Image (spheres, coloured by chain):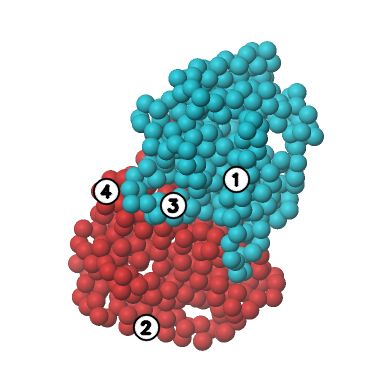
Chain colours: A red, B cyan
Amino acid sequence: MSWEQKLNKYISIISKELEKHLDITYAKNDKLIKAMKYSIMAGGKRLRPILAIASYEIFDTNIEKVLPYACAIEMIHTYSLIHDDLPAMDDDVYRRGKLTNHIVFGEGVAILAGDGLLNYAFEIMINETLKHKNMRPYIDSMNVIAKASGINGMIGGQVVDIESNNQDMDAETLDYIHLNKTAALIIAPLKVGAIIAGADENQINDMEHIGRSLGLAFQIRDDILDIIGDKSKLGKDIGSDEDQSKFTYPSLYGMEKSINKVKDLTYQAQKRLEPYGEKAKFLYELTEYLIGREI
Amino acid sequence: MSWEQKLNKYISIISKELEKHLDITYAKNDKLIKAMKYSIMAGGKRLRPILAIASYEIFDTNIEKVLPYACAIEMIHTYSLIHDDLPAMDDDVYRRGKLTNHIVFGEGVAILAGDGLLNYAFEIMINETLKHKNMRPYIDSMNVIAKASGINGMIGGQVVDIESNNQDMDAETLDYIHLNKTAALIIAPLKVGAIIAGADENQINDMEHIGRSLGLAFQIRDDILDIIGDKSKLGKDIGSDEDQSKFTYPSLYGMEKSINKVKDLTYQAQKRLEPYGEKAKFLYELTEYLIGREI
């Protein structure tokens, strides 16, 4: 199977699993479930759950075991996008080429759909934990995810991001935002994949380092694409960061330095992956793909 | 110690514990932490965490053990109030006699402060779980809370509530809202108190039944107070439900029937408590207090 075929297989497995989780018998709250499904099934890259699988398969073959956690992370990522897009934050009309959640369902429902996805992510992880006799790796994983998505992780990064618009920003603040708003939820699936597969502490630590490099590279690439990207591919307005005179890596360091930084960070991740050899091949090629991605 | 003294002692224990949890060393996300603290320390009744303690002490004396869960529930309750108050939902300016979170910190930060409190509640419960060798009761408790606050609990009730404004409503829909939006997070602390104290299945089941009666009684009393209450005591605008031509128990069944329903539901809860005798005295008197409460 080629790398692309494997990627598509994993995307399909994840999408089916997400759909299964959202196949909920509902009574009167149908609009809420519809709004949650709308954003979850809007066809994202599924990068975060794929990272969980890619990390897991370095250490074990039974990837089914990591799926509940992969889905929980994707739900948390999706809720953060729904809330990010709200008028009180980025005020976006399009996301992934589709109208944003609050445009379709209204702001009130969109806020609750986000809340619902965050809460449901924990419900899924708790359910999974309760199935196992040795609960420890499952709670450890939930712990990693909760911290990554919390006030000293993703939410912390987001608040600094929205509060520093149109203000003077410095390199340190930009790093804080990138590391927390984006990298935290790239690191988490890599760590969780290793933890659930039974990897040892050094290996989990390797995954954390790889995640940190990839997470920063991913965010810088995102900022680059926002300037040079193709709107029809990105599915959102190009230059929307510039419109709001937003501080980004390219605006601070210039385009050439930004492109080199992405390459450098990716190289660091790849170097740390090399000792894992053939088993880490999928993840290795994923890092190559992320450098050159256009969406 | 009189009942009131005990109540005040418990309120003080809970408030201190909440303050301790929010005494976080922060870097750049200080506005987020401040916004979270603002609403948590705004001086609510602390009813939900007190119910967790009241249930716990029926079965065990070491109430410290239930505090992390009592705090987690209060954080979830508080996040739901912050999001409820937003312009896209109830659009309230005052809550507990103070300006609402979004009026003070802005809508974006208020949304994130709510997200932060929900996420942090799970972080606290996960941390607590990891301290124990037998993790089962702690995960079971987290499970009860996650379900109560989720899409088939509190969030489900809230979405039906905001979506049914100015529409035709019926008794069944009103019951759905009361049971999910309010009663779910009254039932949960009563169950969790029993679970963590090591109560058996029948006892946990009793707590669930008591919570259901009290939760409905509490919500109907709330609707009554919104019509006849004293603004200076309630700390919010009287008649705000009527202004939005909102469907409530009194508007559907009339005032007399509503008052009798509160009494009847409270009596049901008290009857189920009687076999627990002296140990359930605090909770019993709490149910008496809830019938007559003016705030």
Q: Whole-Å distance between the Cαs marked 4 and 2?
A: 38 Å
The answer to which of B265 and B51 lies nearer the viewer is B51
Label of residue B128 in the image: 3
In this rendering, does residue B247 appear at all? Answer: no
Residue visible at 69% across and 75% down in the picture: A168
The picture places residue A250, in percent across and down from the top left corner, at: 56, 80
The picture places residue B138, in percent across and down from the top left corner, at: 40, 45
Residue A198, compared with residue B151, is above or below; it is below
Is the residue under label 4 in contact with that under label 1 (CB below 8 Å)? no
In the image, farthest residue toward the right: B232
User: Do the residues indicated by labels 4 and 3 lie within the same chain of the protein?
Assistant: no
- Mark 1 belongs to chain: B
- Mark 2 belongs to chain: A
Residue B193, compared with residue A18, is above or below; it is above
Q: Earlier in the sequence, mark 3 or mark 1?
A: 1
User: Do the residues indicated by labels 3 and 1 lie within the same chain of the protein?
Assistant: yes
Q: Foreground mark, 1 or 2?
A: 1
Location of the N terminus of chain B by quadrant is: top right
* Residue type beneath disc 4: His
Residue visible at 63% across and 79% down in the picture: A170
The picture places residue A155, in percent across and down from the top left corner, at: 55, 60
Residue B230, compared with residue B89, is above or below; it is above
Mark 2 = which residue?
A267
